[in-house]
Image (cartoon, rainbow, N blue to C red):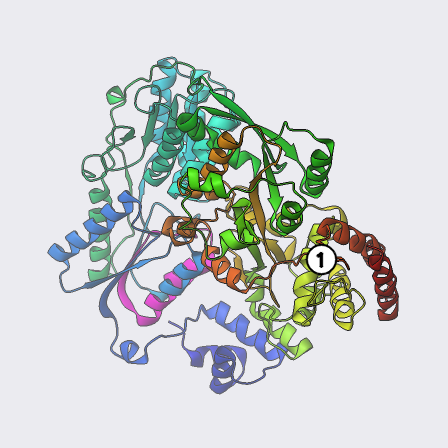
Amino acid sequence: MATIKDVALEAGVSIGTVSNYLNRKTNISEKTAKKITEAIQKLNYVVQSSGRELRQGKINVLGVIFPNISEPYFEKVISSIKGYMDLHGSRYSIEIALTDHNPEKEETVLLNYIGRNVSGIILYSCQPGRQEIFQKLENSKIPYVLIDRRPKKLDCNFIYMDNYALFYKVVKHYCEAGYKDIALITGPLEYDENQYALDGYRDALGVSGVPLREEYLYHCKMIRENGFRAGIHFLQDTRQIPNILLTTSYRLAEGIRYAYAWNHLNLKDDMKLITTGDSLHDVFYFDESIKKTYRSAYEVGEKSSRILLENMESPIVFEKQQYCIQDTFDPGSLEYPKGKHLKGNEYSFRDCIRVLLLDDENAISGMSSLLVDFYEKTRIRVEIVRVLPEHMFDYIEEYHKSGRDDIDVFLIDISWRPYMAESGYLLCLEELAQRHSLEREGFIPHALEHYGEYKGKLYALPFMVCTQLLFYRRDVFQDEYLVRKFEEQNMIPLRPPVSWAKYNTIARFFTRSFNPDSPVEYGHSMSVSYPEELICNLMPRLWEQKGDLYSEEGYIQCDTRQVERAVCNLLEGLKYAVPDELGQRPISTLNHFIEGKTAMVNVYYNYATGIQDWVKSKVTDKFGYTHLPGNPVLSGWSLALSRHTKKAESAFQFIQWASGMEISVPHTILGGQSPKLSVYQNYDLVTLYPWLPKGLQEMENARLRRAPISRNGGILSEKLVETKIYQYLRPLMEQTVWGQSVDREQVAQVLRDMQRDMMQL
């Protein structure tokens, strides 16, 4: 095992210089840093965590590293390892580390075990593609066993289940019985067990003459919430609901079961849900609606332990071993579903309401997928009217002025509530709330106040509650070469920015046209394609300057020094953003980040669900998140009743259900953002969307966009004010995007013209 002395000799520097490099105690030139980095990589040097342990030689500890124990199969394997070692290797203590499928956490644990020189390691890896990590494990000479996942061509002790044979056998069995609607839900295909399952599935369909339907394939992180999303996918996006669903994870199967139960479909008789698992020993995970294979977790654990003990006791003469374990699964034990075409329940509705919602996937697909539950409970039919976010305000205003009464429920922006309540667009909900026993507890603190009330009375219920977060590429922010280059150029450390000036400095550094060494094309992405989006990007910059668009009395004030600085900062930021941001929607800006084009993105975190899409996202395990510089904008949508509705009772039942506790988790899983506090306290949801606790914390710091006041004291239309601001700033943004410079005096003149125009309002 290489030492710090070996690294110093290889790099041609002193031991002290290497130590300073590792601990970043002093400035080291880029040339020297590069030499040390190359020496560390060449020698596979690992920092020793305990000199005392190293001096004593190997310690009698076995390191066991698994993704989690929420998967029953993992729990049983770990239990088997411990049981076998208690009988045959009692002199060793076992340390179990759970990584939550986080590569960074796995690497930290693994290097810790190597540094402590443990006696042996059993690893169920979440990053089998990281060859350099396994090379360090090989160079350490510590005996180890890998389970199910290993790097390509690595000769090592390896135990794996034959998923190819299992899924081939099961799919072929059902195909021969005449079933063609067979779906497969697996974890990420970068893991061999999932790829083998897919290969077996495809080959069985092929030999049976059954065409492969891509919509019947779904790959995701193996947690219940993704199983729920998969179940909704099959209910929504396929021409026929699959009669047979196969999964590689019991937790995925649980999520699918929940999705089908939510839609009141018979999972026990009309379809079959089959998952890998240890049905012989998982007596505490028994569910008639989920069929498990006969996979012996105990055999996997015992074989892994036995091989490791043999390797540790005879390290020199030991020959590495590999075992493929078959599921003892009898296809004859499989039951056949009835095979009828499933359409869900047909309802005899007692009423019908029309609801105005955003024309985007977060508001529409999630809500429409869950309406079956509302139908089952109320027999009230919901017709959804879709309108783009930038057109929603005008649609509601024109609707009210027209005298129409065909829409019962409005979706309104948090900042529109005062104006629309004051203007008489909305029905006061106080009597309805009392009559229907509205549960006012359980909302995020101040949610009812900020999203529902006006002058102490209730006019709306919170529906989607969120604020802005800064998402960034953790991997590029931690790249040793980039860190040192940034510090040399800017004399500050490369960390997530705490001010908008530093934000632009970092964005410039990661823009390839300014820095050819940048691993991404652009520094950041942001949406400024319509007035509301521009304002939400401008306000955090303005609040950092201790300014606002309105005076304490609520009067418009655009020509202040603070507004000027905020506008200049925003224009500079456009130089380092994806060029087409002036025409991009918020979800598009996030997609630039997901596709690996940008180093940062400022986005409302309800849009961020796509980051965790293992099929489309290139940054799933590479991102971090933090607060936005300054104060973020408190944003979101509420559900209100039109003052002209003739179906107030039914409409109120809908908004009470849509903002309620029962729908909170499934709606959040599908990309909405529930106003209920319980969502942020749900461990499984936080595993899926780890930024939720940070988002809740930032809502305490977030600020409301204030409603403008006219000279006679009335509330002005914020939409009108924001549209005028956009009209004045749009030419400056276009000029910047086209590569033309905009000086401070030009900005100041535009703001003066804007202020004169605003006074006419």
Judge by depth and name the residue closer to the eye, 413 or 261.
413
Q: Label 1 sits on what residue type?
A: Pro
Identify whether 714 is placed above or below 176. Answer: below
Quarter of the C terminus within the rendering = bottom right
Does residue 134 belong to the magenta stretch?
yes
> Range of the magenta residues?
111-139
Q: Is residue 637 left or right of residue 168?
A: right
**Which residue is identified by label 1?**
708
Within 10 Å of disc 1 (Cα), the crowding (few <14, some 14-19, many 20+) is many
Q: Is residue 272 left or right of residue 660?
A: left
Identity of the residue drawn at 37% across and 52% down:
683
Identity of the residue drawn at 65% across and 78% down:
488
- Image position, residue 702 (x, y; %): 57, 62
Residue 721 seen: yes
Judge by depth and name the residue closer to the eye, 620 or 127.
620
- Image position, residue 203 (x, y; %): 44, 25
Identity of the residue drawn at 57% across and 40% down:
640
